[in-house]
Image (spheres, grey):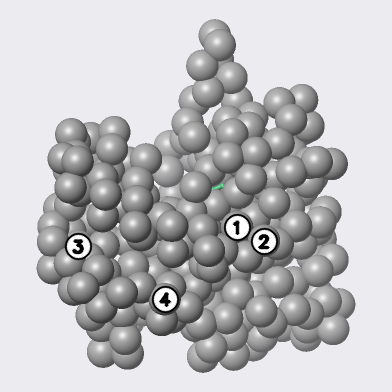
């Protein structure tokens, strides 16, 4: 993990340099709680993905408990343990980067969980890597493999909650995912974000999640997801 203090980082050059080390998580401490600054600072990561459920329908999603008529509005907005996953696993192209800014941590729990893909690959049996790289799974309306071979290694797309919500998995499929989950659990590490911490990671090279926390904690993270700028979109912007 690369850790730095916002006040020692001069400009967005820092984020550009970080892109050169995709297998590292970046943690920036003492980042001011200022959406405009967040936007400018993170701009080199790509195009922020806007969604109607985000704050002002922009690119910031508030990860905080939202309970309407006794139901959580999503898994992210519950206080429950959120198993490690890829964000936007059911998007045609999942986000390339995820940034999370901690406005208010929970006093207890709410710790961020991560597993790096190179670490996971090292610990997965060869036959499981083969199956995960060839077998197609249903992520809502999209069908894809969990592992994909890229020019520089593997990429991952995994969210068991989504996979189990949209299709009935066989016992054999559940056993495969159990095997994957066991390796993930054994190699997951924890980061407790503090107020004003900004964490940035590649969504295709890390799985992330969080531990549960008390319902009344007022925990609040701002989450921004980025689509990679292609040469064409950069030229057109
Ligand atoms: O609450 C967290 O720390 C992570 C939430 C998350 O993974 C998400 O919103 O996609
Ligand atoms: Fe997530």
Question: Could you tell me which residue is drawn at 81 percent across and 56 percent down?
Answer: 194
Asked if labels 2 and 4 touch by Cβ distance under 8 angstroms, the answer is no
Q: Earlier in the sequence, mark 4 or mark 3?
A: 4
Q: Nearer the viewer, mark 4 or mark 2?
A: 4
Q: Secondary structure at mark 2?
A: strand
In space, the residues marked 1 and 4 are separated at their CA atoms by 18 Å
Asked if labels 1 and 2 touch by Cβ distance under 8 angstroms, the answer is yes
Q: Determine which residue is flagged by label 3.
A: 145
- Per the rendering, the mark at residue 113 is 1
Q: Nearer the viewer, mark 4 or mark 3?
A: 4
In space, the residues marked 4 and 2 are separated at their CA atoms by 18 Å
Q: Determine which residue is flagged by label 2.
A: 190
Question: Could you tell me which residue is drawn at 32 percent across and 41 percent down?
Answer: 162
The percent coordinates of residue 39 (x first, y second) are: 61, 63
2 left or right of 202 in image? right
User: Looking at the picture, does residue 156 appear above or below residue 74?
Assistant: below
Q: Determine which residue is flagged by label 4.
A: 123
Question: Could you tell me which residue is drawn at 64 percent across and 55 percent down?
Answer: 112
The percent coordinates of residue 107 (x first, y second) are: 84, 41
Badge 2: how crowded within 10 Å, few (<14), some, or many (20+)? Answer: some
- Per the rendering, the mark at residue 138 is none
Q: Is mark 3 within 8 Å of ligand 2?
A: no
In space, the residues marked 2 and 1 are separated at their CA atoms by 5 Å
Quadrant containing the N terminus in the rendered view: bottom right
Q: Secondary structure at mark 3?
A: loop
């Amino acid at each position: 993990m690369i850790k730095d203090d916002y006040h020692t980082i001069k400009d967005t050059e820092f984020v550009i340099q970080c892109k050169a080390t995709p297998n590292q998580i970046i943690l920036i401490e003492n980042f001011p709680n200022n959406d405009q600054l967040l936007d400018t600072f993170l701009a080199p990561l790509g195009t922020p993905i806007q969604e109607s459920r985000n704050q002002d329908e922009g690119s910031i999603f508030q990860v905080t408990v939202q309970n309407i008529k006794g139901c959580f509005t999503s898994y992210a907005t519950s206080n429950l343990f959120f198993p490690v996953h890829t964000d936007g696993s059911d998007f045609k192209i999942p986000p390339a980067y995820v940034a999370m800014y901690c406005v208010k941590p929970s006093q207890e729990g709410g710790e961020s969980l991560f597993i790096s893909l190179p670490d996971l690959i090292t610990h997965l049996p060869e036959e499981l890597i083969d199956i995960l790289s060839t077998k197609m799974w249903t992520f809502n309306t999209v069908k894809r493999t969990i592992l994909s071979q890229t020019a520089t290694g593997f990429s991952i797309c995994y969210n068991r909650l989504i996979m189990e919500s949209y299709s009935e998995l066989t016992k054999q499929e559940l056993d495969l995912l159990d095997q994957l989950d066991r390796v993930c659990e054994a190699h997951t590490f924890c980061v407790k974000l503090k107020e004003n911490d900004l964490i940035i990671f590649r969504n295709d090279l890390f799985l992330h999640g969080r531990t549960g926390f008390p319902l009344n904690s007022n925990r609040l993270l701002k989450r921004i997801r980025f689509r990679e700028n292609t040469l064409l979109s950069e030229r057109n912007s």
